[in-house]
Amino acid sequence: MNILAYDLGASSGRALLGRLTGSRIEVEEVHRFANDPVKVGERLQWDILRLYHEIKQGLLKTKHLGVQPQSLAIDSWAVDFGLIGRDGELLGNPYHYRDWHTHGVMESLFQSVPKEYIFERTGIQFLTFNTIYQLAAMKQAGSPLLREADRFLMIPDLLRYFLTGEMLNEFTNATSTQLYNPLSGDWDWELINRIGIPGSWFGRVADPGTEAGRIRSSVMTDLGIEAIPVLTAAEHDTASAVAAVPALERSFAYLSCGTWSLMGTEVDCPVINEETLRFNFTNEGGVGRSFRLLKNIMGLWIIQELKREWEREGLAYSFTEIVQLAEQAPAFAAFIDPDDELFLHAGDMRSRIRQYCRSTGQSLPDGPGELARCIFESLALKYRYVLELTEKLSNQRFNGLHMVGGGIQNTLLCQWTADSIGKPVWAGPAEGSAIGNLAVQWIALGVFTDIWEARKVIRESFPVVTYEPSGREAWEEAYGRFRQIAGLAD
Ligand code: ADP
Ligand code: LRH
């Protein structure tokens, strides 16, 4: 029995076929594609129709393998959305969360809707690009789309709608909007009203693993395929990644490592208090109505941008080569706070890293190896800071850290993370989100009883590499220096 998972990250997407042989999961990658946003004028948008095209390509490739999946589901990055008009058509291209249109909007919204009020009702961290600020930005700009809109769909909701013709808002992704109230278990109608958006745009919130229709007949005819039931996954990719963490104990810490680094723990109820607000932690929805108490860290985005810059200059380094160059560069030469605003938007990362180092009185990293080393060491140090906060805010002590996601192919980063946190890192699986997506489908199909059974099978099916901490003294000294440079409070 095969099922199909589409996982769309901010840098690439893939379709994985999953099957169970005995008590093991086997996965087969049927399709992988780049996810390149497109800039038109000043606007940065997702190429949503291309992404839909790639989803159909995945269906075709599956057909060519002679496989008829029993179900399929889609997960993607969070916060972004499309608006559907009264005629059922998509209005405009979804904005990329790194577009500048939200610049300054969060702060100006706080004047009419206080920060504490938003946090009390949603438990969600303040990121300038959250859906709520994107909608507020469109409102402030008088976007004509708002006049025509009839429904609001997050990216996987939208792609699912294209495939099935059915509209449904999925829970884990809905929480990332900062418009969902985890205490009432529904959209926060009052908050939606206060930002001046019609409540009628927001539909029923469906749990991961809900039947969400089947592939529409026109798609079946065009591709020459049979009907496939479509399910909701944990459609926020980070929720899927956390679902796939091969933890055997209920108390565990994770780092989902891709374009973003998402670090935290799983909790039964949202932790909404002064401390979580102060340290800007979030409570995003998880599988089985759990919550992900976590914090966003800028992650591998900065190196992705640098890699693109080098490519433009004709220096086509692979990630493997970048890691090798970083390893050869001098240790602990300069640090950045990866979460400084400087690094959020696309652009010249080399200059910005050097600007950060100059303004903090450090030496200026220059070549690819020095720049990459500065990023990877800084990430490892920031991971320690956020892990300690996660322990404090969740009142737990972790004896190691699970790392999942494409970033675990950076073995140097895994080792430095272990060195920095002074605890073992357990790395795997790399395709965390896609595997979590499969797991939720199997739970819905009655193959697994719950996420804990799924995690056990994931643990037995995929290799987990252990990195033991080393070089503690040097990392301890570096951590003190990093915190001073980054101005990170206790
Ligand atoms: P997303 O889902 O956010 O698009 P992924 O989970 O696919 O991201 O992770 C992509 C990141 O993984 C890249 O930015 C890169 O830093 C890292 N990566 C991928 N392949 C390798 C590799 N061979 N060596 C080192 N790092 C890698
Ligand atoms: C990671 C992710 C993260 C969000 C960001 C927009 O892919 O979904 O959890 O904060 O993208």
Image (cartoon, rainbow, N blue to C red):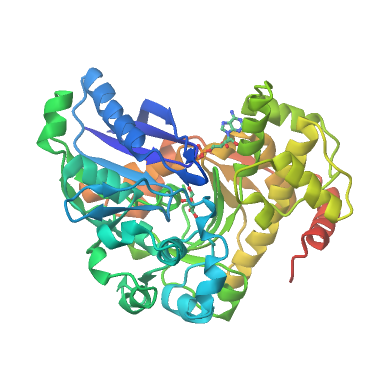
Rendering quadrant holding ligand 1: top right
User: Viewed as shown, does residue 207 lie left or right of 166?
Assistant: right
Q: Nearer the viewer, residue 470 or 180?
A: 180
Pinpoint residue 338: horizontal percent, then vertical percent.
Answer: 68, 52
Measured along the vertical axis of the image, is residue 83 above or below residue 179?
above
Within the image, what quadrant is residue 63 found in? top left
Q: Quadrant of residue 390?
A: bottom right
User: In the visual, does 369 lie left or right of 197?
Assistant: right
Image quarter in which the N terminus is found: top left
420 with respect to 105 (left or right): right
- Point 86% across, 36% down: residue: 330
The quadrant of the rendering that contains the C terminus is bottom right
Q: Residue at x 32, y 56 (%)?
A: 145
How far across and down, in percent of the image, does residue 137 sit?
Answer: 46, 63
* Residue nearest the observer in this picture, 312 or 43: 43
> In the rendered picture of this protein, how many numbered marks are placed on residues?
0
On screen, residue 121 above or below 390 = below
Image coords of residue 296 (percent x, y) = 56, 57
Q: Is residue 339 visible?
A: no
> Can see residue 162?
yes
Q: Position of residue 78 (x, y in %)?
A: 42, 53
Please tell me which residue is depicted at 16% across the width and 38% down the height of the picture. Answer: 215
Q: Residue at coordinates 73% horizontally, 27% vertically from top-left?
A: 324
